[in-house]
Each structure stands twice: as structure tokens, then as C-alpha cells.
Image: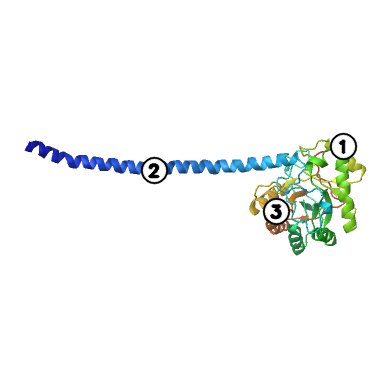
Amino acid sequence: MAGTDTEEGRARPGRIRRLKKSIIFILVMAILIPTGVCVTLGIRYYVTHGKTGELQAQAQETARMYTAEAPDGDMEGADTKAGDDTDRYTADGVAVSKRDSRRGTEETAGPDPLPADGSIRKVYLTFDDGPSSNTGRILDILAEYGVKATFFVVGMEGESAQASYKRIVEEGHTLAMHSYTHKFGEIYQTVDSYAQDLSRLQEYLYDITGVWCRFCRFPGGSSNTVSRVEMGKLIDYLDEQDITYFDWNISSGDATGAYISEDAILRNCLADLPRYQESIILMHDASNKNTTVQALPALIESIQAMENTVIVPITEETEPIQHIKK
């Protein structure tokens, strides 16, 4: 028995060591496995979250295309509301065309260096969906740099909005029309519904500023995918009214409700400028477009630093950029 006890005594430390190793292994695995699972799930979450954000923006855009809501909510009866409504409208989910806006026309866009004769390249800064609280900030920046721009405005009531319309005109910028209500589901029903909306805006702006606007931009552009009436018929209507419509060949990327950084806006605006002799840049001055305002000084400085390049407002002499050519 003594020998047996001795053998067991010798074997016991070994079993204890093995048991300890087993316990340590189990503990380590109990930590590593959940950690690995969490890391994997975290990676999947962020990837999925990014895709979900894109899908949500697309879903919001599509939903708003087919309803009578403006992107910031119900605009019906806006003309009867008192007070300052300049922050009631935002550009979230604006229904822009899916068309590659870098091309601008139906012609294939290729490298377009400055002509050998040294003629000037023209850049048009255009802002849709204002006025808002950001419009004044943009006008301040434009004044600081001595630059004129073009504002495709919507119908907004209140003293602040009316002051913005007047300031746009008084400071030498071009006041142009976007739509009164910006309700895709209503204005794009028929030629008459579009005409009534645009005429309402034209008369409203004339009453405030004394300017009879002759330039406009279709909500979503002439190549939008939501109009229930053929865009050619709306273009014919504009021709009859001696109104010229303008699309764009460069987009800042700020049209959707998804966040876009100041740097991304700047890159989007500058990337294709060397390709065109005339560039119409699409931007927005709705109240939620703060990064657009923040990017504006650097954008202006970059353009002004380009050789033989000027920033100008749209005028009667401007050659329109139009996605649909008749």
C-alpha cells in the first residue's frame, strides 16, 4: 500500500498541473471567442450600417418623389403662414436625376483644355432650394470674395426670406426660379400643374424684387425620373414663356439627405473643372447644408487660382447646360 500511495502521490501533482492548464485554456478561450465574435459582429455592423444609410437615403428620396410632401414636411398653405419660414425647408432627399451629372449634355465629355486663343473659362456657382438661414452666410462669403452667383429659389414667406430675395438682387447675383412648393407629386402631374407652380413663383418674386425671372431649373433637373408628364412638354411650355432652363455638368454631391463632408464637396466640385470651358456647379443653400457653406471659401479660392478662369452669374449670354436636348 505504501508503494501505491507513493505512486499516487507522485501522479497527483501532474494531474493538478494538467487540470490547471485545462482551466487556463478554458478561461482563455472563454475570453478570446466572445472577443472574436464581437469584433466580427462589429465589422459587419459598420459595413451594414453604411449600406443601410445609403438604402435609407435612397428610400427617403424615392418616397418623397411619389408623395406631395416637400423634403422638410408639409409646405401646403405656406403662403398663408406668418413669420419667418426660412428654416422650414431642407434639401434632405431631394429627388435628383440618377444621370451622371459629370457629362452635362448628351455629347460625350472629354478633356477640354483652354483654347489656344487664351479665352476665358467660365464657372457658374448655382444654389438651389433657398432662401434659408444659410443663404445670408453664402451671400456674405460671396461678397467677401467679390463673386457673383445664381440662386434657383423656392417660394418662401416671411420677412427674412423676402429680405434674402432682395439682397440677392441688390448685390448683383442672378435670381432664378426652382419651384414654388417643390412638391414633386404635384408639380409634375401635368403641364398645367407645373405652369401654375412656376407662374406663382414668378409673380411672387416680381412683387418682392421687381425682377421678372427668365431662368429656371427643374426640381431634380430636366432628366429627373419622377415626372408624370413628358419633360419635353414642360420644355415646350418654358419656350413659349421665353424662360430658359439650366441643368448642371458638375454636382457638389450635397443634394441628398446623407451627410457629405466639406472636403468631399470640394473634391466633387473641382475634379472635373478642367474638362469644361463652361461649368455649372450644382449646390444647395437649404438650412441643413452647413458643409456646403463651409466648403465655399476654399472652392472660390481654388477656382480663382486657376489660369484664365472666372466665376460669373448666369445671364442672357450664358450657354445653357441642359440634360435633355430637343
Q: Where is residue 186 in the image (x, y as percent from the top left)?
A: 81, 41
**Upstream in sequence: badge 3 or badge 2:** 2
Amino acid type, callout 1: Lys
Would residue 17 appear left or right of 182 to someone viewing this image?
Answer: left
Front-lying residue, 113 or 285: 285
Other-residue count near label 3 (Cα within 10 Å), few / some / many at <14 / 14–19 / ≥20: many
- State whether residue 235 appears in this view: no
Instruction: Name the residue that disc number 1 marks.
Output: 233
The residue furthest bottom is 144
**Upstream in sequence: badge 2 or badge 1:** 2
Front-lying residue, 257 or 157: 157
Alpha carbons under labels 3 and 1: distance apart: 32 Å
Q: Position of residue 173 (x, y in %)?
A: 82, 58
Kindly indicate the quadrant of the structure image that contains residue 219.
Answer: top right
Alpha carbons under labels 2 and 1: distance apart: 66 Å
The C terminus - image quarter: top right
The N terminus - image quarter: top left
- Labelled disc at residue 289: 3
- Labelled disc at residue 32: 2
Amino acid type, callout 2: Leu
> Which residue is at 71% across, 42% downward?
61
Q: Which of marks 2 and 1 is in front?
A: 2
Q: Where is residue 224 in the image (x, y as percent from the top left)?
A: 77, 39
**Upstream in sequence: badge 3 or badge 1:** 1
Front-lying residue, 318 or 128: 128
Q: Is mark 3 on a helix, strand or loop?
A: loop
